[in-house]
Amino acid sequence: MMNKMRDIRIEKIVLNIGLGSSGNIENALKILKEITGMKPVITRTHRRNTFGVAKGKPIGCKVTIRKNTNEMLKRLLMAKENILKEENFDKNGNFAFGVHEYIDVPGVEYDPQVGIIGFDVCVTLERPGYCIKRKKPFKKIGRSHLITKEEAIKFVKENFGVKIS
């Protein structure tokens, strides 16, 4: 019998488009809204001079998905042809990858006004009980309960049919 506290699940998926100083923020917002159906948030610079852009100016946008994450991840992995590299995984079991063109995602049509823009996908994995790290006073998660890189690779292979190159 398996221990339910050892099951791995997706906590969130973050889609991010970084534009820097040049780029149309409206096009990036439109793309993320079309892919996810959610309203993206504009990211702004925090320091006086980030990437040559003044403080408080927009440099990109992002959207965080916490519901229906399995379906969304399947669509995003299809854009990468279900192939990830081992370097995409960090030591904590999270993984990230880039999609070169938004039209690679199934169900998304090309918009000539937008052109071609790519985006980054960051996936955070968790186990039941990880909510204690968000409570005050902040508590640490035990070493045996953390997700390793190998466990994350196994999870993605089994649940999403991903090949690791």
Image: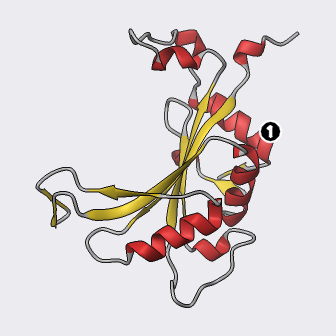
- Residue under pointer 1: 158
58 on left or right of 24: left
Furthest-left residue in view?
48
Furthest-front residue in view?
39
Residue at 62% from the left image edge and 68% from the top image edge: 34
83 on left or right of 131: right
24 on left or right of 82: left
Q: Is residue 50 above or below residue 1?
A: below
Residue 138 point in image, percent of width and height: 40, 12
Residue 55: quarter of image: bottom left
Residue 76 point in image, percent of width and height: 67, 58
Is the N terminus in the top left, top right, bottom left or bottom right quadrant?
A: top right
Residue nearer the viewer, 119 or 159: 119
Counting labels gives 1
Residue at 60% from the left image edge and 57% from the top image edge: 38
Q: Secondary structure at mark 1?
A: helix
What amino acid does circle 1 point to?
Glu
Residue 134 point in image, percent of width and height: 47, 20
Residue nearer the viewer, 21 or 29: 29
Residue 94: quarter of image: top right
Residue 66 point in image, percent of width and height: 62, 41
Residue at 77% from the left image edge and 14% from the top image edge: 4
